[in-house]
Image: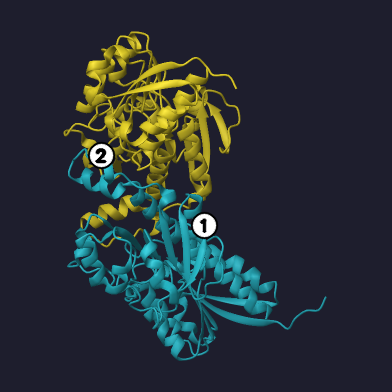
Chain colours: A cyan, B yellow
Amino acid sequence: MTMRPRRTLGLLLSDAVDRAHGARLDQVAAARGVALQRFPLSRAAAALAQIDVAFFSRELYEGSSLRTPGPLSDAFFRVADAAPRLRWLHVCSTGLDLPQYASALARGVRVTASAGVTAISIAQSAVAAILAQARGFDHWLAAQARREWAPLTGADKPRELHDLRVAVIGAGAIGCEIGRLLKALGMQVVAVRRSSEPTPPFDDTFALSQLDDVLPDCDWLVLALPLTPATRGLIDARRLALLRPGARIVNVARGELVDEAALCDALVQGRIRGAYLDTFVQEPLPQASPLWDLPQVWISPHNSAASQGHEERVVDSFVRNLERCLDA
Amino acid sequence: MTMRPRRTLGLLLSDAVDRAHGARLDQVAAARGVALQRFPLSRAAAALAQIDVAFFSRELYEGSSLRTPGPLSDAFFRVADAAPRLRWLHVCSTGLDLPQYASALARGVRVTASAGVTAISIAQSAVAAILAQARGFDHWLAAQARREWAPLTGADKPRELHDLRVAVIGAGAIGCEIGRLLKALGMQVVAVRRSSEPTPPFDDTFALSQLDDVLPDCDWLVLALPLTPATRGLIDARRLALLRPGARIVNVARGELVDEAALCDALVQGRIRGAYLDTFVQEPLPQASPLWDLPQVWISPHNSAASQGHEERVVDSFVRNLERCLDA
């Protein structure tokens, strides 16, 4: 057995992660011949020059909204962005489009995301809304708010789940888990993604270029794709009009994928029968938005990923990356 | 091939079923050497003495509530109860405890239920509510009603589905389908039923006599058992207090299984964190009930079975019974 040369690595991290996971991180490094120097945020300002790696963990994000960093995030990035030797930043989010990463990206720091850590929770939220609205809870809860005993009867009764067809745009970790769960519930599920290559667990797969042909057969359209210049405004008034009358929409991706004003019109007019929206063009959703008051729209405040296990999974993601980095 | 002796059978049925399924019913009978005489409700009063069989189909129930027959039901049973030769009544419900069946039962008419026709839809409604509340939609929708952007953070974040333990009391068609779906979602699910014999798809099975030992480990308690003298008031204040603090309850069986006042107290005090209730001691739920206003309580108006395929499945159930009856 050969000993590798002993190195040191300076890590900026939150005080909470330092307390809960410091020993584990030390071991991961020590097992690879590296001495980890941990700098918890509250004591890191004096050690700027010793920071090589920064870990923006999940609890540091709380109080932030997508486009507006909160005070904990500000405190963290005041240090990280001032650390002259910083060469790697691992972040808790899945996307790298948050404003607090801009400075690190701009100066060439390698930024890695916590891929997949929220996929299962987000998928569960999406499927919860689809199943609940498909069974009639949008109607029942709106009636309950009026203290009205109003059973769904006749033609208003919900359609059978196995007769409903869902198109999921995006077949990443979130989209595939949504597909898997909806299949388990007996629904018909197709994917729309870059290529039309068959993609389990979906019944069928279409390329994004075929989207306009898919929409007229959809009872549900689920957005689970990244926001890029090519996908911004993908679901506009024209495409909303292509959906089957009475279709519903789920957006657990990014608000800017949808023309929000056009969606609102379609909802008010009843052409789109309902929606579950986790994301919005402007977050927090402005007080004046008409979306708040539509009973057929269910809103979660960019919170579909919320779960007790989230912070742990972000730490696990960082540890996996740290191992890979030290093994390289 | 021998010809059976030709018989006739007089059938009281709704005008709608007569129109949509008359030919199919004729064929079922003819294939067994029986000439079916169909008497649609609107023309049946003149043929009372010729009615052998009555089919109380689903659409005749609309406008009824559990304990209060509606006008279509009244019209049907005015005829059925006056038919002197009536020997078999097939009904659309799963239970035989509806007041409109009392007279037929009392005079010795054989009454058969449409077993299982609502199980899948009811199970889907129960699972929809469990999944949606487990993900945080009770909180999110209550915040939305106040136009409040209020993400779940810290200790308020939902627990992982795979950490949640659900006890389903009753392992009939509804209970088993609830178990199957919750397992597919990754939850822990145990059954409580007459015997403790292992029952797929449940992780574990307990006898009803063990209920008090099961309750302290439950995050969700689901009632899917029949109402009998032995189960009336099963979930009383004492048993509610045995549940894990913050547990939730689903009742898709009968309101009388639960001490409704005690449940209400436990919900208001927060010991029971939420509920999905489809059934109530008094239906329609009285305007004065405090349950209407609790945002952590989701109410469907004895409508959890609602689905487009329900009427068809009731007809199928009648046809299967008719075949069996004519084959006997």
Residue B115 in sight from this viewpoint:
no
Say what amino acid the circle numbered 1 marks. Arg
Q: Residue at x 43, y 72 (%)?
A: A225
Which of the labelled discs sits on residue A180, or is there none? 1
Which quarter of the image is occupied by the C terminus of chain A?
A: bottom right
The residue that mark 2 highlights is A151
Q: Is residue A73 left or right of residue B218?
A: left
The residue lying toward the viewer, choosing from B53 and A3, is: B53
Separation of marks 1 and 2 at Cα, in angstroms: 31 Å
Q: Where is residue A91 drawn, in percent x and y?
A: 48, 75
Q: Is residue A199 left or right of residue B91?
A: right
Q: Quadrant of residue B198?
A: top right
Q: Is residue B25 left or right of residue A236?
A: right
Dot placed on the residue nearer the N-terminal end, 1 or 2: 2
Q: Where is residue A319 drawn, in percent x and y?
A: 59, 70
Residue B196 in sight from this viewpoint:
yes
